[in-house]
Image: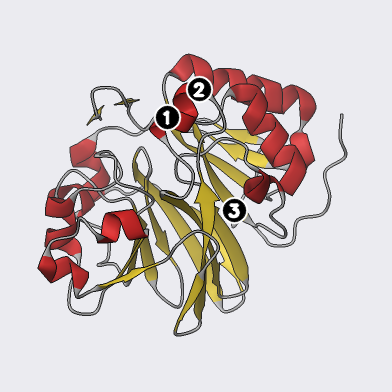
Amino acid sequence: MLARPAFRFAWIGFVPFIVIAGFSGEGARAQDIESDDFSSDSGIISVEQVQQMSVVIRTPIGVIYTDPTGGKSRYDGHPAPDIVLVSHEHHEHYDADTLEEIVGDNTQLVVPPFVMEQLPPKLKGRAISLANGTSSELGSIHIEAIPAYGLTGQSAQWHPRGRGNGYVVSIDGRRIYIAGSSDAVPEMLQLKDIDIAFLPLYPPYALGVDEAIEAVSSFKPEITYIYQYDSTRTRDAFVEKARDNNPGGTRVIARDIGICLALSLLCSD
């Protein structure tokens, strides 16, 4: 078993190696939002999982949403976003109607070029386009677009190279990686100093169990969230393998966050 290095930052409270927990439903989330709190340079970063692929990250500097879908009511009880990151154009990641409801005058929308082409005019005025490998400074927040794509077969067909982004967000002394939909591509494996990673488990369209183990063993995030999965069987297989191998010393958080059916483009709570 690999030895776990000392954490670069602190999870506020007790830290088990693997957390598997369930949400109590859509209505309960607005009233009693479950979050994980981590230390940052000037305070606390809170991670709140809303839906598969969709996360609210509260920081002392600003609030970040990833791939918000399903209407504004899904985000009741969460603070308004300062930054919204969209990974790619698939319906379970890009929902123009939801974006129009939650993107306000003070919100910066960050999208890949392919999504930029599809945005309604109102949203284009609030958006910046980041191609793979480019970056932007939004105040004191640095955002880098990491290529997210498939390597072979259905994954490469579903997520062609150059179309989708993952993102590394450097904020308040921490580096957060949101993978989007991707295989274990070289650009992912070469990442450095990642504090929190959000990874998909969606074979054959994104990471499989062994690929995900390879990924966290390579770039060694402190915390790994499984924020998309095709089935609880796939999710739990990764959890078991991570428990047996402790890849890269990472801590795993894998919650019941609904199943998203990629082929039908439907997400259930």
Q: Position of residue 268 (x, y in %)?
A: 24, 27
Q: Given this view, does label 2 or label 3 mark the residue nearer the observer?
A: 2
For mark 2, what is the residue?
153
Above or below for 179 versus 252: below
Q: 10 Å neighbourhood of mark 2: few (<14), some, or many (≥20)?
A: few
Query: Circle 3 sits on which residue?
Result: 196
**Label 1 environment density (alpha carbons within 10 Å; few <14, some 14–19, many ≥20):** few
Q: Helix, strand or loop at disc 2? A: helix
Q: Is residue 231 above or below residue 20?
A: above
Q: Amino acid at mark 3?
A: Ile
**Upstream in the sequence, badge 1 or badge 3?**
1
Secondary structure at badge 1 equals helix
Q: CA distance from mark 2 to mark 3?
A: 29 Å
Q: Residue at x 59, y 70 (%)?
A: 40
Q: Give the image location of residue 50, x and y in percent.
A: 32, 45
Q: CA distance from mark 2 to mark 1?
A: 6 Å
Q: Which of 89/161 is in front?
A: 161
The residue depicted at 23 percent of the width and 74 percent of the height is 126
- Look at mark 1 in the image and give the residue it sits on: 157
* Along the line of sight, the residue nearer the viewer: 208 or 2: 208
* Residue 60 seen anywhere in this rendered image of the structure: yes
Does 177 appear above or below 51?
below
Q: Is residue 154 left or right of residue 33?
A: right
**x and y percentages locating residue 209 in the rendered image:** 61, 23
Cβ–Cβ below 8 Å for labels 2 and 1?
yes
Q: Label 1 sits on what residue type?
A: Gln
**Figure quadrant of residue 64:** bottom left
Please tell me whether residue 2 is drawn above or below residue 122 in the rendered image.
Answer: above
Q: Is residue 72 visible in this depiction of the protein? A: no
